[in-house]
Image: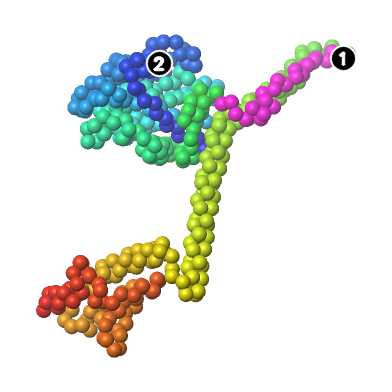
Amino acid sequence: MPYAICRVAKIKTAQAGAAKTAHNYRQRETPNADTERKPLNREYINTAERNYWELATERIQEAGAKVRHDSVRGVEVLLTASPEAFKRQADGSPNDWHGSEWAEANIAFLKAQFGEKNVVSCTLHQDELTPHFHAVVVPITEDGRLSAKDRFNPKTLRQLQTDYAEAMKPFGMERGVEHSRAKHEVMRHVYGAQERSRGELATLTKPEPATRLSIEGPSGLDLVNLSKWRAEQEARLNAELARQLAAANERASKAASIAQDSAGAKDREKTLARQLASVEGTKTKQIQVRKDVEGGFTRALVKVAQGEALPANVLEYAHQVRAGIMAEAEKHVQQALKGPIRQACDLTAQLKKLPGYTYREDAATKQGELRHTATGSRFELAELKPGGVPMKEAYDLAVQRTA
C-alpha cells in the first residue's frame, strides 16, 4: 500500500523565504523539473506568486502576534505519497491531478489543520517525478501567538503524520512507521533517487547481452511465394522482439518497485528493531528492580529472625506505605459517613462493606479497627481523621446531619 508522506521545513530568514519562493514558482532553474510539464503546476492561494516572507509578515500583523528577532515566520509543509500511489495513463504518461479529489482533499486538510488564514500559499507541482504540494503555513496558535515550537514539535508532528494518513485513507494510502528517525527520506521518494538495495538493483539493471536476430534465406519452395516467406520472417522477428521487450519491461518494473520500497522497508526494519531494543531494555530494568526488591525483603526477614533491628531505610519505606494507605482509608471512611448515620452500628455496617478492607472490633475495648487486606496495615478508628476531622467529631457531625 502507498505511504502518505508529510514533511515540514522552517523558514527562518527573509533570504530563505525568497529562495523557496523562487524554487516553488520556478523563477530559477530547477534541474529535477520537466520544463514541458511546468504548465501543469498550480497555485491555489498565492496566485500572484508573492514572496513567502512578505505574506507571512502580513498575516502576523493581521493576527496581532508579537515577533521576536529569532521567530520562525513560516513553515513549508510538503504533502505527497510514495510514487506507486499515482497511476499513469495507458501510454505511460502521467495524469493531471489538478481538480482531482486527491488535490481537493489535500487543500482541505491544510486549511482544517492550520486554519485557513494561516495557509498563505499552496502549490501543486506536477513537473517532477511525483505530484506533490508545497504549502506555506504561518505558525500562529489558537490563542493568537506566533510559535513554531508549539505548532511544530515532535509530539504535534507525530500527530500531523497520523492525521494526514487518516485524511488520505480514501485514496488507498497509509501511515509510515511511527517514531521513525528518518527526516529527509521522503525526498528520495519524491525524486526517485533511492540508493538502497544496490545488490538487488545491480542484478536487475545489468545490461542483457544483445540477442542477434537473423533472417533465414528463402528455400527453393519459398521462391515461388516470396511475399508469404517475407510475412513469416517478419512475424518471427516481431515475436522475438516482443518477448525481449516484455522481459525488459518486467525487469524494469521489478527494479522500480525495489527502488520505491527498499528505503521505506529498511527504515521500518530499523525502527522496529529500535523499538524492540527499547522494550527489552525496559524489561531488563524491571527484572533487576524486582530482584533488588526481593533481595532487600529477604535480608530484612533474616534480620528480624535474628532479633536484629530493621534497616532505617526499610522502616522509612514501611512508614511511607502505611501513611499512603491511611490517607486512602480516611477517604473511604469519609464517604461512608455521608450516608444516614443514626448510631454506631450504622457506621459499622458501612465499614464492613469497604472494598479491600476488613473491619473488626476488639472484644475487650470495643475499639473498631480497619485492616488493609493487601498489606496488612491496621488502623484504629480513633487515629483516623476523615476529611481532616478527628473521627469522633466526624461521627457526631454525621449523626447530626442525619437527624
Of tags 1 and 2, which is closer to the observer? 2
Q: Is residue 391 magenta?
A: no
| Residue under the image location 21 percent in, 27 percent down | 66
Q: Image height check: is 220 above or below 133?
A: above
SS type, badge 1: loop
Q: Is residue 198 magenta?
A: yes
Where's residue 401, x and y in %? 12, 74
| Residue under the image location 20 percent in, 23 percent down | 61
Q: Which residue is mark 2?
A: 23
Q: Which residues are magenta?
A: 194-217
Number of callouts = 2
Amino acid found under the numbered disc labelled 1: Ser
Q: Quadrant of the C terminus?
A: bottom left
Query: In the displayed image of the protein, which residue is found farthest to the front?
Result: 308
Where's residue 308, x and y in %? 46, 71
In this orientation, which residue lies closer to the viewer: 297 or 213?
297
Image check: 215 left or right of 336? Answer: right
Q: Which residue is mark 1?
A: 219
Q: Which mark is residue 148?
A: none
| Residue under the image location 20 percent in, 25 percent down | 62
Where's residue 252, x and y in %? 63, 25
Please say whether residue 340 is visible from this viewpoint: no
The alpha-carbon separation of the residues under discs 1 and 2 comes to: 66 Å
Amino acid found under the numbered disc labelled 2: His
In this orientation, which residue lies closer to the viewer: 214 or 69?
69
Q: Image height check: is 209 above or below 83?
A: above
